[in-house]
Image: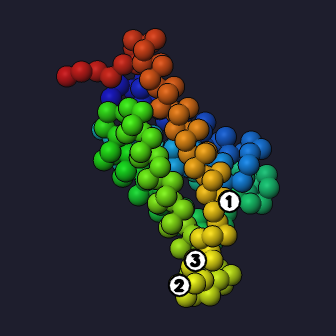
Amino acid sequence: MNNTRFTLFTGMIVAAALSRILPHPPNFAPINAIALFAGAYLADRKLFAFAVPLCAMLLSDTVLEMLTGWGFHSGMWVVYGTMTLITVLGLRFIQKPSLLTVGATTLAASVLFFVLTNCAVWASSGMYAHTFAGLQTCFVAALPFFQNSLLGDMFYSTVLFGSVALAERFIPALKPIKI
């Protein structure tokens, strides 16, 4: 990957992460799209595929904490761990981005994020009984947030992956170098 592409993609990830600071509906956020995008477009620099989105999230969490007091929370390790798994999905399944691969992988990432983060809430919050019925109650209570999360994931994936497709079409210097 040439340095122009790397810089552009890193900048897009940081900008998307910082968009969390703007007013938005609950859970309508770029988290999963950032992880997928990094996995797909920073694949030849695997360390950066993981480090860039995690650092961008830490930056946006820090800004949110300073501005609102809501950036850091006890479940951050689950969110960051899930982002790491979603980056693996991007590395593995979006080697040649297309509407089908990006859409299907975004849906899978949304479901994975929903399941893992809500299992963590169920297991650690004390809000739900530690029974199968308690887990079901937790998932049902989280469904309205899943709708916004899925819409946000689809929106941000479209913006990130679509922007690259348009840029590569109209700016030849951004096209991948074929070896």
Q: Which quarter of the figure has residue 49?
A: top left
Q: Secondary structure at mark 1?
A: helix
User: What percent of the width, then of the height, locates residue 148?
Assistant: 65, 51
The amino acid sitting under disc 2 is Phe
How many angstroms separate mark 2 from mark 1 (CA)?
20 Å
Alpha carbon of mark 1 to alpha carbon of mark 3: how far? 14 Å
Q: Is residue 83 left or right of residue 134?
A: left
User: Circle 2 sits in a helix, a strand or a loop, which is it?
Assistant: helix
Circle 1 packing at 10 Å, graded few (<14), some (14-19), many (20+), is few
Residue identified by numbered label 2: 132
Q: Nearer the viewer, residue 123 or 43?
A: 123
User: Spatial distance from mark 2 to mark 3, Cα to Cα?
Assistant: 6 Å
Label pair 2/3, CB-CB below 8 angstroms: yes
Asked if residue 53 can be seen in this view, the reply is no
Q: Are marks 1 and 3 in contact (CB under 8 Å)?
A: no
Query: Residue at the spot x=61%, y=57% of the render?
Result: 146
Q: Amino acid at mark 1?
A: Pro
SS label for mark 3: helix
Q: Quadrant of the C terminus?
A: top left
Question: How far across and how far down the image is residue 85, in percent?
Answer: 41, 58
Image quarter in which the N terminus is found: top left
Q: What numbered label is drawn on residue 136?
A: 3
Indicate the amino acid at tag 3.
Gln
The residue positioned 68% from the left and 81% from the top of the image is 127
Q: Position of residue 162 (x, y in %)?
A: 49, 27
Would you name the residue on which mark 1 appears? 144
Q: Residues within 10 Å of mark 3 (few under 14, many from 20)?
A: some
Please tell me which of labels 2 and 1 falls first in the chain: 2
In this rendering, position of residue 26 left or right of residue 116: right
Q: How is the image coloured?
A: rainbow
Marks 1 and 3, the one that precedes in the sequence: 3
